[in-house]
Image (cartoon, rainbow, N blue to C red):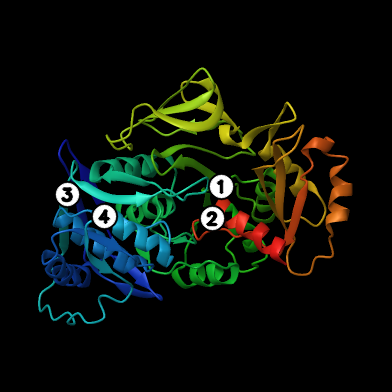
Amino acid sequence: MCVSSKINDSAVTLHFPEKQPFALIAGRALYPSELFHHLSQTTAIMSESDGDILLLCKGRYEFSLALLAAWLLQKNTILPPNLHPATLNRIKDRHSITLELNDGFTHTFSPITLARKLPLYTCSFNLHQQAITLYTSGSTGEPKPVHKTVGNLFSETMALKHAIPWPNSPLTASVPPNHLYGLTFSILLPWVLGVPVVDECPLHGDEVATTMQQVNGQILITVPAHLGALLEQSSINPSILVISSAGALSPELATQWQQQYQQEIVEIYGSSETGIIAYRKQLHNPVWITFDSVQISCNDEGLLQVNSPFIHHHESLPFQSQDIVSLQNSSGFYLQGRADSIVKIAGKRISLTTVENALKQCLGVLDAAVVAVPVAGHIRDMALWAIIATGSDSQLTVRDLRQQLLSLLEGIKIPRRMILVEQLPHESSGKLRRQSLMKLFQKEGRA
């Protein structure tokens, strides 16, 4: 695929040699000549549109094709946080969208009839042109738009390329490409590493294992919520490089993975606004190490501040995060939780993360999420509620759980309301939205 990518002061140029596949679709190799044949037809469709492009493709080949065509025409692409009809309607109200592209938009394209194929295909983009508008996950509120230029995206991808020793292998990703994590790691990174884009987006453990076998993959891009199921897959190559992001990886899961596969998971820390910030292997060293070009500091409240070329100029610099950190030096820090995960109940500061971790230590608990909700009381004006994932065949009861928590938490930290479910309502990105958790409480209340 793209054996090299060059960035100068004004442009990035991608090189696609015909001898290397651009993508793998159900195991079939698709080469740059076919990509550029499709590209000419996609740009013809987009040329008739004078507004933004709403990109709804889940397949990574057509997603890649649409991005390349839009950038060649210097059009902005809108990436929704999810495909729920209500979300899409809000986005359409907010943007001037004149074209939507869904999976299968290439099915009516004419077949390739090139008599002569070029040995090398190239395309260039202005670094300063607007590339995408994506949305935050909305885990703590409504999703908000985040803008990125071509330069933001490719400077981030190149930093990622040089920081980690990547195997020469296709990347399998269990995260969709419409979030920055999936976009950077499963679309842009293959372009600059020179490995094929894997079209599929497998979510379940057996699907991930099947896809990795099909493409002979040695790299897995995933989220903590998917890793537990993957531990049960005996066909996973034990030597694969695993990248995890979009949520906290528990020490227990990190240890289980290393014990089973003798490989430590590489964690990535970042956000939609900042892009990648830091990485670590927590069992080797719990300190987060910043990527090149990322500068960090913290304010008087201990909140992390970030400055890097991956951040759009629309954001205030340095970008003010809501994560509490302890700086070790100019390029290393400990994460100590989110500011909005600390609540005061009856005069005591309580960390929701601490309560979640205690729940995860209980026998029979696979995962847990804790929220603070306002209540009317003489002493407390907030209460902790918890959703606990126990799997499909669990015999655990709330009474059993409370009994276990008595030895782990002070009474005031034990959630007043707990619901046991088979699994937590994670988004496709691996994130948990407060709104989804509250719906479970509402449903249980009606029952």
Label 4 residue SS: loop
Q: Which residue is mark 1?
A: 247
Given residues 199 and 343, the one toward you in this image is: 343
Q: Is residue 83 visible?
A: no
Q: How far is the residue under mark 3 from the one under mark 1?
A: 32 Å
Type of amino acid under label 4: His
Q: Quadrant of the C terminus?
A: bottom right
Q: How far is the residue under mark 3 from the one under mark 2?
A: 31 Å
Mark 1 or mark 4, earlier in chain:
4
Mark 3 or mark 2, earlier in chain:
3
Look at 37% across and 54% down and name the residue there: 183
Look at 42% across and 59% down and name the residue there: 169
Q: Which residue is mark 3?
A: 125
Q: How far is the residue under mark 2 from the one under mark 4?
A: 26 Å
Up/down of 46 relative to 381, above or below: below
Label 4: how many Cα within 10 Å (few below 14, some 14–19, many 20+): some
Mark 3 or mark 1, earlier in chain:
3
